[in-house]
Image (spheres, helix red, strand yellow):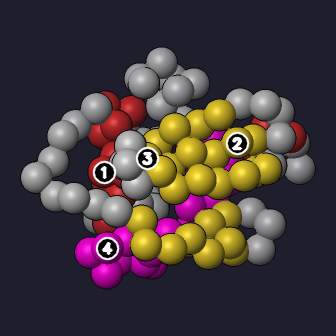
Amino acid sequence: MEARFQIKKITVNSELRELQISWADGHLSRFPMEGLRKACPCVFCQGGHENMGKPVDPSIFLERSEHDRLITRITQVGNYAIQIHWNDGHQTGIYRFERLRDMCPVEQGII
């Protein structure tokens, strides 16, 4: 697996309300939690199987919400993904490393 898709460290920064991922190639991704929750890749959140795998609209990382989405736990899934447990009880989304890196708002110049 390319260094670009290998995670060195994951940090949940509750004060900044963001998930930070340090990648093996030296890049640091910063995902606002609300946007990351909206980008949940599960079939329910994506609106059905026909919508699975579509690119994430980067503007979701700029949107504000009335909700206070927080990460309560992260579980690694094999060597390819993480499962995020949210304070709203949702936990079915499996975030593949490639998808996380591809939707990184830092690389896309969003934040």
Name the foreground residue: 66 vs 61. 66
Q: CA distance from mark 2 to mark 3?
A: 13 Å
Which residue of the protein is positioned furthest toward the front in this rendering?
15
Label 4 secondary element: loop
- The first of marks 3 and 1 along the sequence is 3
The span picked out in magenta is 84-103
Whichever of labels 2 and 4 marks the residue nearer the N terminus, that label is: 2
The residue shown at (62%, 66%) is 82
Disc assigned to residue 58: none
Residue 89 among magenta residues: yes
Disc 3: which residue? 18
Residue holding disc 2: 22
Q: CA distance from mark 3 to mark 1?
A: 8 Å
Residues under labels 2 and 4: Cα distance?
Answer: 23 Å
**In this rendering, does residue 102 appear at all?**
no
Q: Amino acid at mark 2?
A: Ser
Q: Position of residue 61 (x, y in %)?
A: 34, 37
